[in-house]
Amino acid sequence: MTTVLFPGTFDPIHYGHINIARRAADLFDEVVVAVYAREQKNILFPPEQRLALAKEALKDIKNISITAYTGLTVKFAKKIDATAIVRGLRVFSDFEYEFRMALANNRLEPSIDVIALITNEEHTFLSSTTVREIAALGGDVSSMVPKHVQEALQNRFQELGEGQKIVPLTSLRD
């Protein structure tokens, strides 16, 4: 049985993530979607909520399990007997970053491969940062995330109020 790890912060999970997870599930026996659970600056949702949102988004895929983890991703992959780490690529800059990370992970754990899946064209613009910023500014993210994630975003920004500093704004507000 081939197990692969699909790690990320998933803050929040969006259709690009879901697309990569579904495609990985078509290719491998078991996909472990791992939500990085260490508290970090500029993270909108706490780990437990990111985990719950991912579980809901992927609940219909039988060979996907969702868990939380901390520490080195490659060490977690080894711990769960994954043979590879799955990553999604959207644009050229993703490749450069993922290439460097794959080389570093190979240095740490040569038995774990990295498999990059190129996202479907309609998801190339999607990132969790973009989703958070649009939602923070009251924009419609219904084409980017499932309904339960959209509702969680709306609720979270209502909780935080106008002065929130979790989402650094770029050019979308201008």
Image: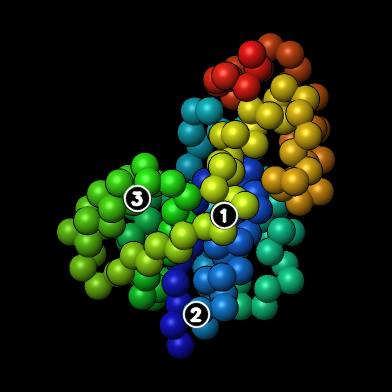
| Mark 3 residue type | Phe
Give the mark, 3 or 1, whose residue is nearer the N terminus.
3
Q: Name the residue under label 3.
A: 95
Which amino acid, by three-letter code, is at mark 1?
A: Glu
- Tell which residue pokes out farthest to the left in this image: 107
Q: Is residue 47 visible in this depiction of the protein?
A: no
Q: Residue 28 carries which label?
A: 2
> What secondary structure is marked by label 2?
loop
Render colour scheme: rainbow
Q: Residues within 10 Å of mark 1 (few under 14, many from 20)?
A: few
Figure check: 158 above or below 72: above
Left of 68 or right of it: where is 108?
A: left
Q: In this view, does 166 lie above or below 60?
A: above
Can you see residue 169? yes
Relative depth, front residue between 122 and 87: 122
Query: What separation in Å lies between label 3 and label 2 (alpha carbons)?
Result: 22 Å
Which of the two discs, 3 and 2, labels the residue nearer the N terminus? 2
Left or right of residue 41, residue 139 in this image: right
Residue projecting furthest to the bottom: 1
Query: In which image quadrant can residue 173 be found?
Result: top right
Whole-percent x and y of residue 127?
56, 41
Q: Which of marks 3 and 2 is in front?
A: 3
Residue 41's x, y, as percent?
49, 28
- Circle 3 sits in a helix, a strand or a loop, which is it? helix
Which residue is at 81% across, 48% downward?
A: 147
The label number, if any, that marks residue 141 in the structure image = none
As drawn, the residue found furthest toward the front would be 121
Q: What residue sits right under mark 1 in the picture? A: 121
Q: Which amino acid, mark 2?
A: Phe
